Image (cartoon, rainbow, N blue to C red):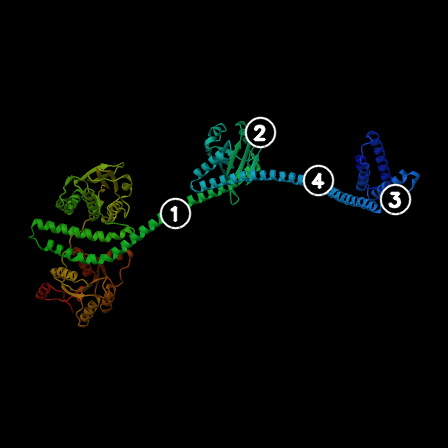
């Protein structure tokens, strides 16, 4: 019954239905009681009232207020009325009725509240189920989206990882090529890294020639060499551009062929025959100029992804820039080398110019110091016939040394000025000259080494039959002297010095006289041998100037001679000079016959700022019988000359120095000509040769003589001036006693 009621009273019904249910329930209870009475013995007092109470409570719980109330009334009123004989209403206990109704109503209220709660909870559950389903669907959609996003993230991560790997490879290649400055190594690094890291099955770099429209293979990868031979693409091989579909690439576009078998051009077909299927042609381009192509190939078709093609394009941009920088570096290096060579040349020229200026500046002082030595030596050789042979030999050696020093000073400017276009050549006996050099240098190769306990042995093979050569004796003597000095310096522990002369023909009809200076010293390596003739190159450290062999070379060039150098490290050196033999009549200039003293006794004014030179000139001129007056400096010379003009006794001739403080020789000559235009002026200076070459002779000078002066040259000039000028009108006869008194005067006369 409970199950029936629970099933039928689960949901609320109308009051009539509820009343009917109450009646049915009471009927059912009555039936149940009847059945139980039949079954249960009468002696047992069974509590049938509980069945009715249970029915009331069940109806009140599931049936509601009406069902519970109707059931209560049926039990408390109807059933007693029906079971009472005569159907009289029994006496009712209102309290029990009210209590039972209250319980019924209370149970119904509680049941109704629970049903409302259950209904609300049901609705909430239904709503919650709907929401859960919706949320579940949303979560399912979100999960699907998240899974898709994860997949995309993984794909992106893989792409980024691949891109990062390519960027790392690009960075490695860029760093590697940035450390190299030659194109060959740059290309080799690029292809090798592509073979190992991208990777590729074949790679090469080709250079493009726009004039011939061809590509030349510049570099092939190490792993690609075997395939390159098969493809006939070894280094220096050529590829036609126009007929092989490469025109787009040389125009600056990256060309990718997924399968070269489908390309009809000859070159792609050759690649296909070699086993390549996918090929990328990447241009090497700088500022819209394509100068090369990088070729990368693989055996599988469609094997290059778009990212790899983009990587090759970016890589080629870096390679092109590095190649351009390498080319610029090579060009800059060449320019720098040229500039450095130019700077060295300019520096050397500046040094030579400074040396020439220094030589020009000190020539005056050196020549002034040499002049008294030269004059007195010449006077002794001329006027002292009773000299011993040894003394005369010493004086002649001194005279030659003075002349050589004068020539050396005069030639020092040759380091920054071209040599004179013409030289006065004379016939030179090289055998005799070599022996003179040995005498001049004896102290250097004999005396000085012996004081240090070192022995240098001398060997000479100088036949007297050597033919003469045309040259300047002092210059050749200086060259041999320098060679002897170098040979001695090369033998710090002693050895053998050899001078040898001979005649030979060297590949021409003109015979040559060969002079050799050999030593057994330290020798020279090949680098030193090649550079030893350069100015300022020396291996002697602070002791050397680097000018000795340079001067020897200059002298040889002026004499059309050649220099040969044989040297072995540790064994010694042979310096060989080859002079062409003088042709008949060549080099016949002689020193000239010495001019004798001028027969006319002259009044001569000598002006100079060097007291020793003044005294030497005065002694020499007075020895020839002239009357000499001296003046120390240009100002005193002008005053002295003007005094004699005022007194009516002008000098017949004036000899003046050029370089003097305050008043130089130009001012002296101008003042002389202004006071006495007929008076000749001789300019005596160490710069005489330069003034003559440059045409810078002062306008008031009649003759120029070099210092140190030679008596024969001075006498010749005096004779020439006597012949050209009416000196007799200016000359004044002076008693011999007066001349002798002046000749015995040791000091310069000053007026």
- For label 1, the residue is 336
Residue 733 percent across, percent down from the top left: 12, 66
Instruction: Say which residue label 4 marks.
Output: 133
The label on residue 91 is 3
Mark nearest the camera among 1 and 2 is 2
Looking at the image, is mark 3 or mark 4 earlier in the sequence? Answer: 3
Kindly report which numbered mark, 3 or 1, lies closer to the viewer in this rendering: 3
Residue at 15%, 61% in the rendered image = 612
Q: Which of the two residues, 750 or 511, is positioned nearer the viewer here?
A: 750
Q: Secondary structure at mark 1?
A: helix
Q: CA distance from mark 2 to mark 3?
A: 120 Å
Within-10-Å neighbours for mark 3: few <14, some 14–19, many 20+: few
In terms of image quadrants, where is residue 575? top left
Q: CA distance from mark 3 to mark 1?
A: 143 Å
* In this picture, residue 97 sits left or right of residue 216: right
**Mark 4 → mark 1, Cα distance in angstroms:** 83 Å
Q: Is residue 310 left or right of residue 1?
A: left
- Helix, strand, or loop for circle 2? helix
Asked whether residue 48 is in view, the answer is yes
Of labels 3 and 1, earlier in sequence is 3
- Residue at label 2? 261
Q: Quick check: 114 left or right of 84?
A: left
Cα distance in 3D space between marks 3 and 4: 62 Å
Judging depth in this view, the residue of 314 and 95 nearest the camera is 95
Q: Within 10 Å of the Cα at label 4, are there few (<14), some (14-19), or many (20+) other Cα atoms? A: few
Q: Nearer the viewer, residue 289 or 562?
A: 289
Q: Give the label, 2 or 3, closer to the camera.
A: 3
Task: Residue 636 in the image: state x and y as whole percent.
Answer: 19, 68
| Residue furthest out toward the right | 86
Above or below, 425 relative to 276: below
């Amino acid at each position: 019954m409970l199950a029936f009621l629970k099933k039928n009273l689960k949901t609320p019904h109308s009051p009539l239905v509820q009343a009917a249910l109450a009646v049915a329930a009471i009927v059912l209870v009555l039936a149940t009681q009847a059945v139980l009475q039949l079954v249960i013995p009468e002696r047992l007092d069974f509590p049938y009232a509980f069945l009715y109470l249970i029915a009331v409570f069940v109806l009140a719980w599931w049936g509601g207020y009406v069902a519970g109330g109707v059931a209560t009334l049926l039990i408390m009123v109807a059933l007693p009325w029906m079971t009472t004989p005569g159907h009289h209403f029994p006496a009712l206990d209102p309290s029990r009725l009210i209590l039972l109704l209250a319980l019924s109503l209370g149970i119904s209220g509680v049941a109704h509240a629970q049903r409302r709660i259950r209904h609300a909870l049901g609705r909430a559950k239904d709503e919650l189920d709907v929401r859960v389903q919706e949320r579940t669907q949303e979560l399912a959609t979100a999960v699907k989206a998240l899974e898709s996003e994860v997949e995309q993230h993984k794909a992106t991560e893989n792409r980024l990882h691949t891109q990062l790997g390519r960027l790392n490879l690009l960075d490695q290649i860029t760093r590697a090529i940035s450390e190299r400055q030659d194109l060959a190594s740059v290309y080799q690094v690029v292809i090798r890294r592509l073979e190992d890291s991208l990777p590729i099955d074949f790679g090469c770099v080709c250079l493009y020639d726009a004039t011939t429209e061809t590509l030349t293979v510049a570099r092939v990868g190490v792993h690609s060499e075997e395939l390159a031979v098969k493809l006939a693409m070894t280094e220096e091989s050529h590829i036609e551009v126009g007929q092989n579909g490469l025109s787009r690439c040389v125009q600056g576009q990256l060309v990718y062929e997924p399968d070269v078998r489908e390309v009809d051009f000859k070159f792609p077909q050759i690649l296909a025959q070699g086993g390549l299927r996918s090929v990328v042609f990447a241009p090497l381009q700088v500022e819209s100029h394509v100068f090369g192509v990088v070729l990368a190939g693989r055996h599988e078709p469609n094997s290059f992804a778009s990212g790899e093609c983009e990587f090759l394009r970016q890589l080629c941009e870096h390679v092109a820039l590095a190649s351009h920088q390498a080319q610029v570096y090579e060009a800059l290096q060449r320019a720098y080398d040229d500039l450095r060579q130019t700077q060295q040349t300019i520096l050397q020229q500046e040094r030579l110019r400074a040396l020439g200026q220094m030589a020009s500046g000190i020539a005056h002082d050196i020549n002034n110091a040499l002049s008294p030595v030269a004059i007195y030596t010449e006077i002794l050789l001329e006027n002292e016939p009773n000299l011993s042979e040894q003394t005369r030999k010493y004086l002649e050696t001194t005279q030659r040394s003075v002349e050589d020093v004068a020539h050396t000073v005069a030639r020092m400017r040759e380091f920054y000025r071209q040599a004179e276009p013409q030289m006065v050549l004379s016939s030179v006996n090289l055998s005799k000259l070599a022996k003179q050099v040995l005498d001049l240098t004896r102290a250097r190769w004999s005396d000085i080494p012996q004081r240090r306990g070192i022995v240098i042995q001398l060997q000479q093979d100088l036949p007297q039959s050597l033919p003469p050569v045309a040259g300047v004796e002092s210059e050749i003597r200086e060259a041999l002297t320098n060679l002897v000095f170098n040979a001695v310096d090369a033998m710090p522990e002693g050895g053998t010095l050899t001078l040898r002369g001979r005649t030979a023909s060297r590949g021409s009809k003109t015979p040559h006289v060969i002079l050799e200076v050999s030593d057994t010293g330290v020798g020279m390596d090949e680098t030193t041998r090649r550079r030893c003739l350069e100015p300022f190159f020396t291996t002697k450290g602070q002791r050397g100037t680097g000018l000795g062999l340079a001067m020897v070379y200059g002298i040889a060039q002026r004499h059309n001679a050649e220099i040969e150098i044989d040297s072995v490290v540790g064994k010694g050196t042979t310096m060989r000079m080859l002079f062409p033999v003088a042709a008949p009549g060549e080099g016949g200039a002689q020193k000239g016959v010495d001019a004798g003293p001028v027969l006319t006794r002259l009044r001569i004014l000598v002006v100079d700022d060097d007291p020793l030179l003044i005294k030497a000139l005065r002694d020499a001129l007075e020895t020839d019988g002239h009357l000499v007056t001296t003046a120390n400096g240009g100002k005193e010379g002008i005053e002295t000359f003007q005094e004699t003009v005022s007194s009516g006794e002008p000098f017949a001739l004036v000899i003046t120095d050029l370089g003097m403080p305050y008043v130089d020789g130009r001012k002296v000559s101008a003042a002389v000509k202004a006071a006495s235009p007929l008076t000749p002026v001789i300019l005596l200076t160490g710069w005489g040769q330069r003034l003559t070459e440059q045409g810078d002779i002062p306008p008031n000078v009649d003759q120029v003589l070099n210092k140190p002066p030679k008596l024969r040259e001075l006498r010749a000039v005096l004779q020439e001036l006597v012949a050209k000028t009416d000196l007799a009108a200016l000359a004044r006869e002076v008693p011999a006693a007066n001349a002798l008194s002046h000749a015995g005067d040791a000091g310069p006369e000053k007026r």
